């Protein structure tokens, strides 16, 4: 649906902020004009929504890859990410400790390719993130290294892997996040992971392991949300679903009602 209608629907359901996939704005969202950025910001503001950040960063333009040995492709990809850092900061409308987060998932665009080992790809990703960190820090943006399941990528499959990169870089501009859908590679209970790495977790995605919205499966969101509360997590809890076989508004309504039963004081957002 149009962006302004989506904002109205999300706010009417009780969501407090919007997390945006750049490709829903334009094929190259980093090239959006100052006028368009101001329009998006005004639309969110008019609907009393905050901007939480960006995700699905490199789905478009076509041909991007973060860890390839092809320097021309890799340079173009990271230039795109630098432009998204500015977009993220420019869309920020609510006061807080940062100007939005950028969830660095993008499994196809970070996986080891062309005979490269996962270790080599991870080292390249870490190197490029370290170069992007000062820009993110200067704009008040946090790039979040997202752990993804092994069936999606062979680079960064656990929260421990993600935190290791965060520690190597040592910048407040690079942190991590937790996504319940992407935990197939984890071997420890998720509440324990939250307690261990809580200081590095700056954003949370909630969804069932099969990609549907919370409440349609058997994931223990009660334990997850209470673990977040125990570590005094202060970021957003963001609904991110992948099954849209049902009406989107009904999915959003069902999810927020289900989650608020477990943590009424939590701040929820909707990803688009």
Image (spheres, rainbow, N blue to C red):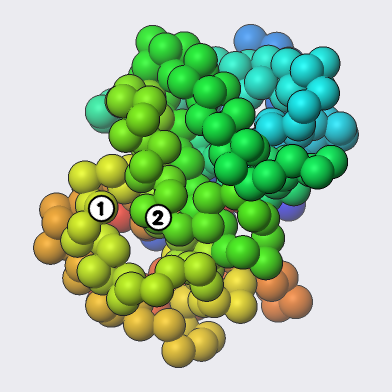
Residue 172 percent location from the top left of the image: 31, 25
Residue 159, which numbered label?
Answer: 2
- Using the image, determine if residue 136 lies above or below residue 222: above
Disc 1 packing (10 Å; few <14; some 14–19; many ≥20): some
Query: Image point 21% across, 58% down: which residue?
Result: 196
The number of callouts visible is: 2
Measured Cα–Cα span from mark 2 to mark 1? 8 Å
The mark that comes first in sequence, 2 or 1, is 2
Q: Are marks 2 and 1 in contact (CB under 8 Å)?
A: yes
Query: Image point 64% across, 54% down: which residue?
Result: 154
Residue 107 percent location from the top left of the image: 67, 50
Disc 2 packing (10 Å; few <14; some 14–19; many ≥20): many
In the picture, measured across the screen, residue 46 lies left or right of residue 194, that is right
Query: Image point 57% across, 22% down: which residue?
Result: 128
In the picture, measured across the screen, residue 79 lies left or right of residue 168, that is right
SS at circle 1? helix
The residue under label 1 is 197
The answer to which of 254 and 140 lies nearer the viewer is 140
- Residue 113 appears in view: yes
Residue 171 percent location from the top left of the image: 33, 23
């Amino acid at each position: 649906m149009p962006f302004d209608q989506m904002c109205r629907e999300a706010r009417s359901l009780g969501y407090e902020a919007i997390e945006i996939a750049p490709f829903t704005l334009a094929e190259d969202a980093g090239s959006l004009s100052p006028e368009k950025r101001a329009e998006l910001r005004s639309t969110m503001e008019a609907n009393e929504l905050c901007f939480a950040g960006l995700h699905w960063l490199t789905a478009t333009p076509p041909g991007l890859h973060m860890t390839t040995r092809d320097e021309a492709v890799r340079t173009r990809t990271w230039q795109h990410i630098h432009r998204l850092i500015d977009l993220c900061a420019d869309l920020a409308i609510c006061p807080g400790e940062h100007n939005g987060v950028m969830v660095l998932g993008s499994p196809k665009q970070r996986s080891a390719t062309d005979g490269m080992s996962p270790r080599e790809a991870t080292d390249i990703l870490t190197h490029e993130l370290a170069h992007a960190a000062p820009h993110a820090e200067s704009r008040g943006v946090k790039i979040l290294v997202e752990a993804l399941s092994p069936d999606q990528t062979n680079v960064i499959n656990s929260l421990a892997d993600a935190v290791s990169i965060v520690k190597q870089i040592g910048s407040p501009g690079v942190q991590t996040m937790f996504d319940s859908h992407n935990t197939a590679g984890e071997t420890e209970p998720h509440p324990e992971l939250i307690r261990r790495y809580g200081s590095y977790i700056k954003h949370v995605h909630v969804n069932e392991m099969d990609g549907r919205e919370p409440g349609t499966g058997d994931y223990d969101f009660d334990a997850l949300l209470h673990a977040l509360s125990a570590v005094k997590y202060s970021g957003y809890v963001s609904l991110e679903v992948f099954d849209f076989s049902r009406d989107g508004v009904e999915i959003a309504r069902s999810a927020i009602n289900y989650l608020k039963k477990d943590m009424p004081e939590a701040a929820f957002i909707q990803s688009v």
